[in-house]
Every structure is written in C-alpha cells, then in structure tokens.
Amino acid sequence: MARPVIAIVGRPNVGKSTIFNRVVGDRLAIVEDKPGVTRDRLYSPGEWNGRAFSIVDTGGIEIDGEDEIMKSVRMQAELAIEEADVIIFMCDAKSGVTHADDEVAQMLFRSHKPVVLAVNKVDNQGRMDEIYEFYGLGFGTPIAVSGSHGLGIGDMLDAAIEKLPEIEDDGYDDDVIRVALIGRPNVGKSSLVNALLGEERVIVSNVAGTTRDAIDTPFERDGQKYVLIDTAGMRKRGKVYESTEKYSVMRALKAIERADVVLVLINGEEGIIEQDKHIAGYAHEAGKASIFVVNKWDVVDKDDKTMQEFTQTIRDHFLFMTYAPIVYLSAKTKQRLHKLLPVVNHVSEQHAMRIQTHLLNDVVSDAVAYNPPPTDKGKRLKINYVTQVATKPPTIVIFVNNPEMMHFSYERYLENKIRAAFDFEGTPVRLFTRKKS
Ligand code: GDP
Ligand code: GDP
C-alpha cells in the first residue's frame, strides 16, 4: 500500500529540519548502524498512532541556480502542493508573521490541500502569546511546537494524521506486479520503458493514474501482468520547476511507495552518484523489492573483468542492499534486455513469499546450535520461537526471553542464515525481536 506523504514547508530557518529530525529521530538512530545509508536525508518513512506515512523536509531540497530565497521557498511550496497529501506549514514564533509567510500561505490556500499550521520555537509557556498573530494566516488554530525542546510534536502529528486521505486502492489486481523506474534524469528511464513495451507489442493502454500523477503503463507478457510506474514521464510534462532535477526526488518517492519492485537505474557510463544512494536507501526502507539496472552498457568499454568490477563498486556503495540483483543492459540496443523481466518476476515472488513456521524454526534452531547467541553478564539470549507475520516485505518476529540482549550482529547472522535457506533475493527482510509473552 502506498504511504501518504506529509511535507514540511516554510521559509529558511523556521526550524523545518529540526522538526523533521524530531519526527524521524529514532529511525535515524537505527539507520546509523547500517553503513551506506546516508544520514542527511530529506525524507523518511514515519509512523504515528498506527498510521504509516512518509515525511519530507522540502527545505533540504536544493534548487539548482535558485539563490534567491523567496523563489526557492515558492518552488518548494509548489512542489509540496503537487506531491504531498498533507502539508505542515511551519512558521517561527520568534520572528512573527513575515511577508514570506503570507506569500506561502496564499499559495497553500489557493491549492485547497490540507494544511496544518505549526508555529515553531515556542520553547516555553511564556511564548504562547506569540502564536495568536498566526491565526491571521487563515489555517485555523496554529499548533505551538518547539523543535529544540521536542514540544507539541505529537499534537502536530495528530493534526496531520487527521487530515490524511483514506488509503485508496490503486485499481490494479493483486497479481499485477507494480514496477517503478527510478534514477536521475537521462539515465534512460523512458528509453527502458519504450524498449520493454516495444519488445512486447502488447501495450494495453497508457492511462494516467486515476487520482495520482503517475503515468502508469500496464502491459502483459507470458501471462504475467505488469504496470510500469514511470517517473520520467511525470517529469516531462513540463511544469516550470520540473526543469530542476533535484525535484525528481519527491516524484521518485511517490513512485516507490506505489511499487512492489523498484528498478534503480544506474548509468553504466558514469557510475554511481549520491542521489542514487538516497533513492535506493528509500526503496530499502520502504520495504520494496529492488533490482539495480545498469543501463547504457553498450557504450562501456568492456573487458572480461568490467562487469565484475562494476558489481563490486555497486556492492561497496550499497552495503545495506546486498540482496538486490544487478542486471546489465542497454535500453538503446536492447542488448540483454530479455534478462530483466525474469528477474522482476523472481524478486516479486520472493517479496511476497511466506515461509511455513516449522521450516523457519528448523533453520533458526540449526543456526543457534551452530553459533549460540553471546552471553551478557552470565545471561544468555534464548530464542523461543520464530514466525513470519507479514509479506511484502517478508517480516519475521523472533520471540526471545529478553529482547535487549539481541544484538544487531546476531540479528544479521540470523538473517543471513534465513536468506541462505530461503533465498529472499531482491527483497529486504525485516526481523523484529519481541519478548515471549
Ligand atoms: P530550517 O532552515 O527551516 O530547516 O531550520 P533549521 O531546523 O535549520 O533551524 C534553524 C535555526 O532555528 C537553528 O539554529 C535551530 O537550532 C533553531 N531552532 C529550531 N527549532 C527551534 C526551537 O524550537 N526553538 C528555538 N529557540 N530555536 C530553534
Ligand atoms: P530518462 O531521463 O531517464 O528518461 O532518460 P532517457 O530515456 O530520456 O534517455 C536519456 C538519453 O540517454 C537519451 O539520449 C537516450 O537515447 C540515451 N540512452 C538511454 N538508454 C541508453 C542506452 O542503453 N545506451 C545508450 N548509448 N544511450 C542510451
């Protein structure tokens, strides 16, 4: 299911990134032990009161060539209006309502998007008086927050969740594999879509997503139905800001949320860039199956070691996604193109796979017998029982005597043993440790 997107909008220095970090704080801490996942993220999955969402700090999205502050804030607001389901409009109690706030307010107001007005830097009760002038912006009662002190964040999220739309069905049957093509501009996303469809010649139709922005292209091959979610198509529709490549990040995020399988396109000619990592990291965290597709392989000078070396480079850059297969191809010449869909089918199956409890327990018992959990102050972690509680991605709960004794390295050891036994190629596997009740 696609998570709705909450965007934080506001002028510089009101505290957007401080609030963003408050909302995703715990998760960032978890991510830090995983090498390769960058910390300075602008978007993150989040959850509040049982409702999952993605949150985006639009302030962190740099606009190339836009040094004029107001222009850049305006564009960020425009982006959020296009892409977000709920907008948190952040202002600053210390500076009061500024002209820039007024301007953003007018844009948001005209958009009819749900808006939560938050006034930051209300660090103590004494500052509560300062929020009244913000009523004038026209978004009802302002919610007082303090990013520095962590105050009011729950109220702000309550208000945002309340305004989220109901989760809507995307209209495709469950057996359709939803494939998102993600990658920086010019990596060859459109070319790959065309190459895939050209080869099939069974284009059903080219419909715009019902209520969404994506250009979805359904097609069928060998009895399997697919829908390609093409962010390139979205970008090319020609809004002003779409000339800016950094904006494609938020588009990518929306497409990933809707996908089962994410094709992370990498330019074989130019190698890996930071943005590739951000995007792949998001697909991982969102629990999607992923495949690295190295495109433009036709123009790479190759010898018998080139593919092996490129593979090693990908593995070095994406340490957290060793499960993702790599396909080398050329969308232009269609060289090796036929290899792609079978891999898509395979990882999609693995993503949806459910392992019987007794098989899972056999594997974990063997793993524990072979390499028992370490002891801590004379006590030993005891694993009682393991069971898969969800698919897409496979999610496994490990019931133990004392969850605090489960170490990241031991969890990783178990994951490796589980993968060795059941494959799970292409999909993240989530492990949770819980106290046996
Ligand atoms: P952004 O540009 O909107 O992302 O703003 P930042 O999160 O970078 O914050 C701008 C400045 O405001 C930083 O110096 C923060 O330390 C400060 N700041 C953020 N939240 C608060 C707050 O709740 N109270 C106070 N007093 N300062 C804050
Ligand atoms: P997008 O922005 O990711 O959708 O990229 P496009 O599909 O528009 O491709 C950008 C450019 O790269 C175009 O000039 C394509 O012809 C070229 N291109 C795409 N795939 C390949 C490929 O496999 N090999 C070569 N040599 N060029 C390619």
Image (spheres, rainbow, N blue to C red):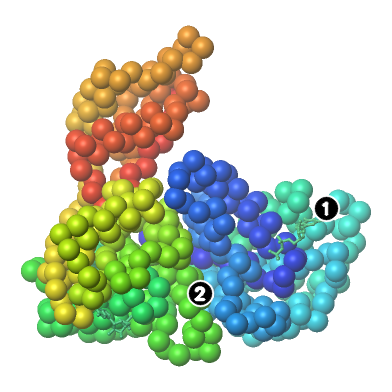
Label 2 crowding class (10 Å Cα cut-off): few <14, some 14-19, many 20+? Answer: some
Residue visible at 33% across and 18% down in the picture: 372
Residue 1: x %, y % from top left: 38, 60
Where is 191 relative to 34, above or below? below
State which image quarter holds ligand 1.
Answer: bottom right
For mark 2, give the secondary structure. Answer: helix
Which labelled disc corresponds to residue 123?
A: 1
Residue visible at 76% across and 77% down in the picture: 101
Is residue 154 in sight in this rendering?
A: yes
Which labelled disc corresponds to residue 246?
A: 2
Judged left or right of residue 149, residue 209 is left
Residue type beneath disc 1: Asp
Which quadrant, please, contains the C terminus? top left
Residue type beneath disc 2: Lys
Where is 416 relative to 427, above or below? above
Name the foreground residue: 426 vs 157.
426
Does mark 1's beta carbon lie closer than 8 Å to ligand 1?
yes
Residue visible at 83% across and 53% down in the picture: 123
Which labelled disc corresponds to residue 57?
A: none
Where is 120 relative to 12, above or below? above
Judged left or right of residue 118, residue 208 is left
Q: Quadrant of residue 394?
A: top left
